[in-house]
Amino acid sequence: MPLAEALALAEHAGQDLIEIAPGITPPVARVMDFGRWQYRKEKERKKAQRGIKISEVKGVRVRLGTSVHDIALKMGKAASFLKNGHKIKLNLNLRGREKYLNPQFIQSRLTHIISQIALPVAVIEGPKKGPRGLTVVLELDKRKNAKDQQVARQTGQDNQNRQNPSAQTREGSLQRESSARETAGPEKVAGAEH
């Protein structure tokens, strides 16, 4: 349709001619209210943004000489960051002669520190050697976390069964007793009162 004809059609309808897809040939246009079109576009943009989860990279610094208790506190904080959906940048700072220690020792120490996190983690980047030491970026391992939750659910059900076994036996004995009454009749069941 020619442009002049489309403009005349839009003016006759009392609406606007909006170019929907300008990049293609011929360009696609629609006759509609421009304010309504802007409103719909804004609504779609906000809906798309709602699905995006913004995660930050939180930093945790540790040294080789950091005490066991302090490592436990810092890794507890790191676990809370992971639960909130953030990533962790773990810096193992090395000072002075610590930079020249055996790399296997430093790597084992870093592995030990990461193992102190209570949640299953996956290493995204690293360990990278930098001017101040080693850097590792971690995130929550969703595959292991899903398996752990499934195991926890099963364990929770098993624990409930273990905590209240008398309820199961009572239910089972009541079912056996009632089925015996139905099959034998009331006068043949021993101990049944009439």
Image (cartoon, helix red, strand yellow):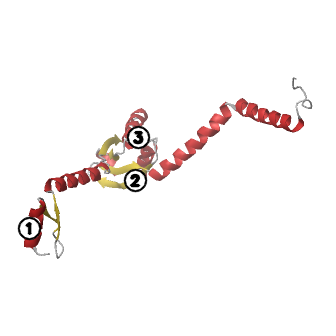
Residue to which mark 3 is pinned: 79
Res. 122 in view: yes
Front residue of 81/9: it is 9
Front position among marks 1 and 3: 1
Sooner in the amino-acid sequence: mark 2 or mark 3 = 3
Q: Position of residue 42 (x, y in %)?
A: 21, 52
Looking at the picture, does residue 108 appear above or below residue 156? below
Which residue is at the far front? 12
Q: Where is residue 60 in the image (x, y as percent from the top left)?
A: 33, 42
Front position among marks 2 and 3: 3
Q: For the point 18% across and 53% down, which residue is it?
A: 36
Residue to which mark 1 is pinned: 8
Res. 65 in view: no
Q: Position of residue 103 (x, y in %)?
A: 39, 53
Residue to which mark 2 is pinned: 123
Rate crowding at label 1 as few (under 14), some (14 to 19) or many (20 or more) other CA atoms within 10 Å.
few
Sooner in the amino-acid sequence: mark 2 or mark 1 = 1
Q: For the point 72% across and 34% down, which residue is it?
A: 168
Q: Which amino acid does label 3 sit on?
A: Ala
Q: For the point 46% across and 47% down, which residue is it?
A: 120
Q: Position of residue 64 (x, y in %)?
A: 37, 42
- Looking at the figure, which quarter contains the N terminus? bottom left
Mark 1 vs mark 3, CA separation in Å? 64 Å
Q: What residue type is labelled 2?
A: Val
Which residue is at the far right? 188
